[in-house]
Structures are given as structure tokens and as C-alpha cells.
Image: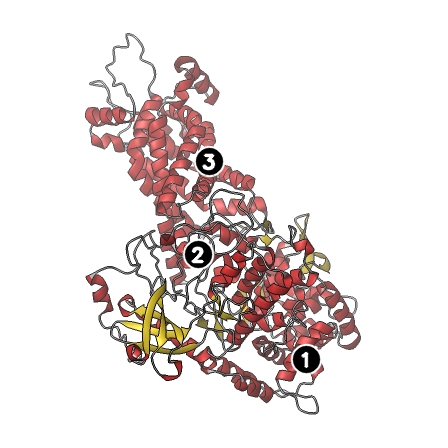
Amino acid sequence: MGLCYGKPIEPPKNLADCPIVLDEKDEQTHRPSIGKTPKFPFYSPSPLPSLFKTSPANSSSVPSTPLRFLKRPFPPPSPAKHIKAFLLRRHGSIKPNEATIPEGSECDEIAIGLDKNFGFLRNFSTCYEIGEEVGRGHFGYTCSAKGRKGSLKGQDVAVKVIPKSQMTTAIAIEDVRREVKMLRALTGHKNLVQFYDAYEDEDNVYVVMELCKGGELLDRILSRGGKYSEEDAKIVIVQILSVVAYCHLQGVVHRDLKPENFLFTTKDKHSPLKAIDFGLSDYVKPDERLNDIVGSAYYVAPEVLHRSYGTEADMWSIGVISYILLCGSRPFWSRTESGIFRAVLKADPSFEEAPWPDLSRDAVDFVKRLLNKDYRKRLTAAQALSHPWLVGFHDMKIPLDMIVYRLVKAYICSSSLRKTALGALAKTLTIPQLAYLREQFTLLGPSKSGFISLNNFKLAMTKNSTDAMKDSRVLDYVNVVSSLQYKKFDFEEFCAAAISVHQLEGLGSWEQHARTAYEFFEKDGNRPIMIEELASELGLSPSVPVHVVLQDWIRHSDGKLSFLGFVRLVHGVSSRQVGLDRHLKAMSNGFNSVRLGSGGQVNLVVILKSRQIGLAQFDSVLKTSVNFENGDMLAMADHGKPKSDISFAGTFASSAFAACFAEICTIPLDTAKVRLQLQKKAVAGDGLGLPKYRGLLGTVGTIAREEGLSALWKGIVPGLHRQCLFGGLRIGLYEPVKTFYVRKDHVGDVPLSKKILAALTTGGLAIAIANPTDLVKVRLQAEGKLPPGVPRRYSGALNAYSTIVRQEGVTALWTGLGPNIMRNAIINAAELASYDQVKQTILKIPGFSDNVFTHLLAGLGAGFFAVCIGSPVDVVKSRMMGDSAYKSTLDCFVKTLKNDGPLAFYKGFIPNFGRLGSWNVIMFLTLEQAKKFVRNLESSQS
């Protein structure tokens, strides 16, 4: 992985570009323009806007996090733009600036039949005197108000006003209902904004909450010059962890934690911090995963982009906030959203620059363990409060941790052999690690004799339950755990059951833990075991060839579990994982040795085709790893390695269709290009009144005038033949060839040189197969208007094939193969490489985004670059195919240079660029849609 360095921030200047955060269930997005009320699914603005004039929260095309002083003259883009919208635009699912909700009467028609009665109180105006507007969001606005009567009489409150006219979908209505329900259930925690009540009338919903007058956490960060001291940062982080741990225990994941969503109650330095804005929050059961892509770009967790996440995503966001508090810069930065996402997925935050070397080791470890890309190795909120960096700093009670329930459930369902292995691993825990487990054991209410039963788990959770816990179905999960049949736990076995192997892997001391645990296991639990018995212990299906996949788990010398087997056993396995192990074994010629990598993964040194690769990222090579703790299979996608989400046949068909469609649209320009390239200098006294072509429009006009419009489409039949073969093969083979060059074991970004090499190979290979179709197309295009009485050489495409074979031989179909391979290999490489580079450059320009217009410019840029490089060989190819008088590629090159001069190699440049540029745009846009169709078709069939 590379390093991602922080980037400074400038205060924003334009309020119209405010950050966009949409509901995750919406399938389309719309960027609001100045002067119009944006129509969005429900958006939940903060109860109180920023009181800091220069806060990025008040405007918004700038990221809302503080950074070091600018090294570049322009501010980065907004981090709060909706992530799903970006991905939809990237895959062509929506058009930029496309409104999700129609305006005017269309909205009214859509809203017909929607029940907008929430059952809230309807006497808002009698209970509160509304004040001035203090903030406006994308789907409502916030006002100050004062209570008229009751317990809040004379008290200042914040009122979020949500117009019912904006609730144009059932999802939007449900979002309002869910947020109010969450606030009502969760209110009462000292670090969560106090909810008072909800009201409604015919026009609006009114959510009455505590008025926080101290401003945003972001404002405090900026006022401090960008960073906190360790002690001050602890005060903030402890409060954030406290409320997040409370929410997670109730089964609520916030999904949009960032400095803008925490307010201080007063302007006092030691004012309590309050979490706000639950508009994107959702319920999540401990054994379930969410797949909606929501949040703010700079704070989004990697697994959210992978569309499989739970409460761990909030902990990543807290890690980003902690990083900002301690050093004043973002851990991940890029000029574009796509760059931010790539950094989040692939880059490592920098801990080398100041002030990190001067901070305490515990502070650095705390942030690193929250910013672990593997969510299974990330700390929970309760564990973070128990981290050595925070222990002794606060008097806050450590809350019950839901992960304990998941781990204990997995332990009970494990084999006796795995229980023994986990017991050995628990003996290696340090005193700080045991302190957290002791805290959790105490919260479960052990008996006087020091034992807890599964009923203790249910009673402990019931004491902490709210209505939110019922809605999230956490209690249902707890009931399942408590209904299992198992003996009582003492503290020693509880430690074995509640230990998280993946979190231990995240420690630098993991290898020592594993080695020491294996020594304990050798003394107390290891025993000779048959492969069949091991397979039975693991619950593998009979279809798994256990002698093949498990032979390295057992030592051949004494039949006992090997170190590899021990490490894999404590992680837990499934039949699917064993199948992946078998696939890895089939790739290799045998395992040479086993050790532990620095990251905690099993490090296998594999001999793969005489090339030794250290698999420090063992799970990355397997591409899938099993989360035994909750039984879920986590697909660990490697975005650096080439992969295809549809079959080769689907890719070939999509590419062929897109290429044929582009050919039909652009062949008139190709015909004009060929005529210009084949035109030679007039020979005096030749006596032939052949037309002379001048320029793109002149050539098109001359052909249409002299031969008719249909002549512009000469060669369309072999042209389509060519595109079916060449277009389908060059794109269909690109991913497999790229994989061949980087090897299947490659992890990380594919080097640009490998991409160019793969494109050169596929371009040359594809045209070598499709050369006969290219030859016939050029021959047909080359025949212009002939003198009276002179017959045409070919009556059509099929006649051209047969005539060439009959008169010139089969090998003549591959005339000009050399320059044709050169031309198409070069153009193929130039198109792919330059398209990516031009697109990346365009996206760095402020105001541009990843949309159709950007693709248009990138396609034109790729076409121009390809023509500049490929025009000389293209001219030689056309002349050799159009005139059999040339003996070889070199002969054609020399004669063209001698007779027509060097500029002849760029004859037809403008029509060639016009044709190739437009061809690229049409082909790539059509290809994306065709692949999407094929992908959906294959998914439905599977």
C-alpha cells in the first residue's frame, strides 16, 4: 500500500455548493443549483448551524476537515457529496444534474396516495413561539424557538422544520418516521442531543430538540489552528466514544460521524459535546450487514464502499476524527472523490510526519487500530474506551459490548478442538487486555462463586435496552444466544470465548501471541488426529477433498496439528474457505515454510512456477476470508488486481456490439480518411479525370456528389465483420492478458507498463485474426468513381474475399499485416493509457466531475493521442491494402516518403481524428451500457 498524506484546507467561499448527503435508499441524485429549492429524499440538517463564520460546514465545496497550510492554490472538493451518487454516475446509471424528483404538478401527481400523517402532536403553534431561521438543509431548515407553556416554558429550543411537500416518496416519509423514532428512543444520554417532541400540521413536521449554542466541533478545531493537544483530544474522543458505544449497543449505526455532526452545548471550554443528525442512521442486527453506500467521502469506511458493513464503519469515522484532532490533517486526501475512495481503499495514512513522532506511542496505536482497513481488526467503541491511551483518563463506565455476544455464540458452536486452541490463546493475553474482559465479565453479573450462565447475557442486555433495541432486533439475537445449551462460564473460559482473534492480529505482538499459544496448545491440547476426524471437527461437507486441502494442517511426523493448522483453526473455517485453500494449493507446487507476517496474517512462502512470493497478505491472495465470529463471509475485493464482473463471452459480445455501433456511426469519416490516404500526387498526362480530394468536408462532399451518399458507407459489411472480431477480442482479452502479465498472485496496483503491454498484445493479436476483414474493407472503400467502361474489381464483400483468394492467394488476405499490427497495437495501447490519463487530468480541474461530459473529453483526447502516434503506420497500412504494387512494409514506407514527402504520413489526419475521436466516445459509452445489460442478464440467470 502507498502512503496517503494529509492536505490543508481553505475556508469555502460559496454557500450554493453545500455538501450533499442523501438517503441511502435513493437510486438517483441531483445537484442543486442556485435559486432553486433542491428536491431530495429526506435530509436531516443539524439542529443548529455553525456559529463560526468561516466554517466549511457553512458552505461547502470545501472539505469539512482542517488541514495544514495549502501547498496547492485551490481547495479540494466537498467530502460530503453522496457516495452512492458518485458510483452511479461512474457506472453510467444516471446523468449528472438529473433531477430525481420532477417539478411542479408532476411532484403532486407522484405524491398522490402517500400517507403523510405521522400521528405526531398537532398543537405546535400553541406550545412554541417560532424564532428566526438559523440554518437550512437540503430538505428542511432549522429555527430557534421558545416554549410557550409546559415544562419547556421560556426555554430556548431548536426546531427542525421538514416540509411535507418535499416528501414525495414512501422512502422519504419512512426516513422521517425512523429518525424521530430513533431520537425518541435514544434520548437521555448525556452526549446525545436531547429530543423533546415531534409535531406536525398539514404542511410541515416539526422536530423539537435541545438548542446547542456552543457551535460545531469543527469550529473548535479551526479556532485552535487545526489540532488539539493529546489531553484535549482525549476529552473530545471519550465523549464521542461514549455516545457511539451507547448507540451500537442499541443496534443503531450512525453512518455519518464527522466533526460537523457534534455540537457543544455552550461556548465554555469544557462544554459537553452532543451528537446530532441521525438522518442517515439505521438499525443493524449483530449478525447482519448493511449494503447501502452512504456517508461523507473523507470519513467513509472501506467496507462501506465494498457494500458490506456494520457498526465497525462508525469506528473508522472516529479514527479519522481522532487523526484530525491530533495532527490537524486528513488521513486520506485527493482532489477528486474517486481519488478519495481509492485512498481509503488502498493507501495507508502517514504517521511519519510531524507531529506523530512526538506523540505518545499509545496515541499512535489508538488511531492505527481504528484506521485498520480490515473491520474485524478494528476496535469497538467499548474496547476503545478501554485502550491504554484512555485508561485512567476518564471516570466513564465501560459499557457492555455487543461483540462479546457474537464471539461467545461462535465459541459455543465451535468444535472442542477449537475451544482448546482458543483457551491456549487466551493464556497469552496481557493485563490491559484482560482488564477489558474483566470489565465485560463483571457487567454480565457473575454469581458469588464467579460463574455466569447464558441467562446472565439476557439479563444484562435487558437492563440496558431501549425501544431502539427492539426495533433493531438486538434482543432477538440475545434471546438466541441465551437459548443455547452450554455450561456456566468461569472467567478463564469466558476469556477464551470472548477473545477476538482478528483483533489480536491487528497488534504488533500477534506473532508472539500465536507462537506462545501454540506452545501451550502443544503441552495441553494437541494430539494426533486423523484428517477425517479434523474434517468432522470443522464440520466440512463430504464433497470437500479433505486429504488434499487439509494435509498441511497436520504434521506428517506425529500426526498432530501443525502451526498452520493451529492458526487457521483459531480463526475458524468453513467449507467455502477450505475450497479457497484448495484453489491456492492447486496454483502452487507446495508450501515451503510457514511463518507469521507483521500484519498478523498467516505468511505462506509459496513456490509458484519457480517464483517465490511472500504472501504477507494471505487473505488478500485468497480474495476471501471468513469471519468466524459472526458466520459471515467477507469478500475482500482487491481493486488493484484486474478482474471482470461478467464472463468473457459477455465481455466479447458487449465489446463487439459497441464496436459495430460505433463503426456504423463513423464509417463515412473512415471512408474519407482512406481516400485521402490513398490519394497520390497527380501524374501529368495520365488522362484520367479522377476526383481530387481536399480536406474532410471536401472529401465527403466529393464522394457524395460523384458517387452518391451510399458510397460513404462502402465497406460497411466487412467493417462490421472486422469490429465483431477485432472489437470483441481486443477488449475481451484485455483483462485475461493483463492478469497473465502481472501473475495471479499479484496484489496491489497494476503497473502502467503492464497495462500498456497488455493493450499492445491484445491489439496486435486481435487484428492478426481480423486482418482479412480489414483488407476487404479498405479495398472496397478505396474504389471511387471509375472512368466509363471500367468495371469494378469487387461487387461486394463476399465477392471481394473470394476474388482476392482466387487471384492473389489465401495469404493475400493478410497483406499489410505488419503495419496493421503495429498500427492497431499502438492505437489500442494509446487509447487505453491516454484515456485514463486524460480523464484523471480533467478531474483535477475544479468544476469537473466524473460524468458523461468528462468521458466525452477523455474519449476525444484518447482519439487525438492515438491518431498522432498511429497515423504514419495507418497510412502505410491503407496504401498497402489499397494497392498491391508495394512489395513490403518498408517498400511502401520508402516510396511514400520519396514520392509524396513526410507530410504524406499525416494525410487524412483530420478525418482520421474526427473518426477515431468520435468512434472512441461512441464505443466507450455504448460499451458501458451493453456491459450493464449483460451483467444484469447474467445475474438474473445465475
Q: Mark number for residue 830?
A: 3
Q: Residue at x 40, y 61 (%)?
A: 21
Q: Is residue 557 visible?
A: yes
Hey, what amino acid is under mark 3? Ala
- For residue 681, above or below residue 629: above
Hey, what amino acid is under mark 1? Arg
Q: Nearer the viewer, residue 41 or 893?
A: 41
Q: Is residue 902 left or right of residue 168?
A: right
Location of mark 1 (residue): 438
Q: Is residue 151 left or right of residue 418?
A: left
Which mark is first along the chain, 3 or 2? 2
- For residue 547, above or below residue 249: above
CB under 8 Å between callouts 2 and 3?
A: no
Q: Quadrant of residue 553?
A: bottom right
Which mark is first along the chain, 2 or 1? 2
- For residue 83, above or below residue 204: above
Location of mark 2 (residue): 53
Q: Quadrant of residue 596?
A: bottom right
